[in-house]
């Protein structure tokens, strides 16, 4: 069975019932759902399909060949999690989800993939003839990746976390660039298989991107501070107001108290977005 499961085989039709036709290959009987067939094959005819053991532990073939196989890898969606076994992944079989064993997953279960996360996997068969998902290796990710352009700095990218380390998380973007999120550039560690939106904070010489899950400075500031940024952008980057301006002037122009204004200016200065010079609040150049 080890040489047949997970591969395309040809069976010789020997029987049928209401739902299936049955065929043999090397002395073993496989079923094929009639709903997959345009016409019912004659007895003795040969039919090819992908061989697997269905969820009732019956040998079966399907004409719908999965996008992954033994030595063939692709991204597949996680559909369920079982703590004592691993995660179940949909590879396109009609009545069978494939398990990625807990032995291949992070030691901390809260970092396991959740439903709708995605994993780059192939297939493997164990010594008992059981089909399992096989996580792609670091070398495989590097082989399919392309170098990132330095122009991507400060751009947003979307990618899938494929490797977890103490120092940080490794990501493959939707455009197949490699990225790394240092543990200082995230508030919490993303899961294996989690799809993340990140900001490019640097591009290394080898084309790998340094990424951050933290918001940009202007995204992390208060509503008052964002209002000040908008006002500056609409006034060529400078306004005749500082923390020395009177409460009445600030209230009349911005509609906030001087205390709110000072806190907002302080946040913006700390973020390196503005400065106060010659009685003006000025927007720093990017």
Image (cartoon, rainbow, N blue to C red):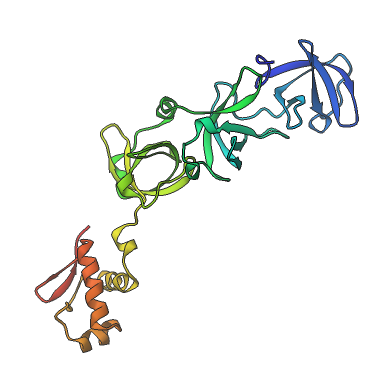
Give the position of the C terminus as an image quadrant: bottom left
Tell me if I can see residue 132 in this picture.
yes
Instruction: Name the image quarter holding residue 76.
Output: top right
Give the position of the N terminus as an image quadrant: top right
Measured along the vertical axis of the image, is residue 133 above or below residue 200?
A: above
Q: Is residue 124 left or right of residue 167?
A: right
Residue in the foreground of this view, choosing between 115 and 51: 115
Instruction: Name the image quarter holding residue 134.
Output: top right
Residue 165 x %, y %: 37, 37
Residue 269 x %, y %: 20, 66
Residue 152 x %, y %: 32, 45
Q: Is residue 126 left or right of residue 280?
A: right
The residue drawn where x is 35% and y is 50% is 186
Q: Is residue 259 left or right of residue 193?
A: left
Residue 224 x %, y %: 31, 74
The residue drawn where x is 77% and y is 26% is 58
Tell me if I can see residue 235 in this picture.
no
The residue drawn where x is 55% and y is 21% is 71
Measured along the vertical axis of the image, is residue 204 above or below residue 61?
A: below
């Amino acid at each position: 069975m080890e040489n047949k499961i997970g591969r395309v085989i040809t069976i010789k039709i020997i029987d049928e019932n209401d739902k299936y036709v049955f065929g043999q290959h090397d002395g073993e009987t496989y079923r094929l759902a009639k709903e997959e067939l345009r016409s019912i094959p004659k007895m003795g005819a040969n039919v090819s399909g992908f061989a697997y053991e269905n969820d009732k532990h019956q040998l079966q073939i399907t004409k719908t060949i999965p996008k992954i196989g033994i030595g063939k890898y692709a991204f597949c969606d996680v559909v369920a999690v079982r703590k004592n076994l691993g995660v179940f992944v949909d590879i396109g079989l009609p009545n069978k989800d494939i398990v990625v064993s807990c032995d291949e997953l992070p030691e901390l279960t809260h970092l396991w993939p959740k439903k709708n996360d995605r994993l780059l996997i192939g297939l493997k068969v164990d010594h008992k003839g059981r089909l399992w998902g096989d996580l792609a290796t670091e070398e495989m990710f590097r082989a399919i990746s392309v170098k990132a352009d330095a122009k991507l700095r400060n751009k947003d990218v979307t990618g899938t976390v494929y490797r977890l380390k103490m120092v940080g998380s490794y990501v493959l973007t939707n455009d197949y660039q490699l990225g790394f999120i240092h543990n200082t550039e995230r508030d919490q560690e993303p899961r294996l298989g989690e799809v993340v939106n990140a900001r490019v904070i640097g591009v290394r010489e080898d084309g790998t991107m340094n990424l951050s899950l933290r918001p940009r400075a202007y995204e992390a500031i208060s509503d008052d501070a964002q209002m000040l940024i908008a006002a500056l952008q609409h006034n060529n980057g400078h306004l005749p107001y500082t923390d020395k301006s009177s409460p009445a002037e600030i209230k009349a122009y911005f509609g906030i108290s001087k205390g709110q204004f000072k806190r907002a200016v302080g946040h913006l200065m700390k973020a390196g977005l503005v400065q106060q010079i010659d009685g003006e609040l000025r927007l720093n150049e990017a």
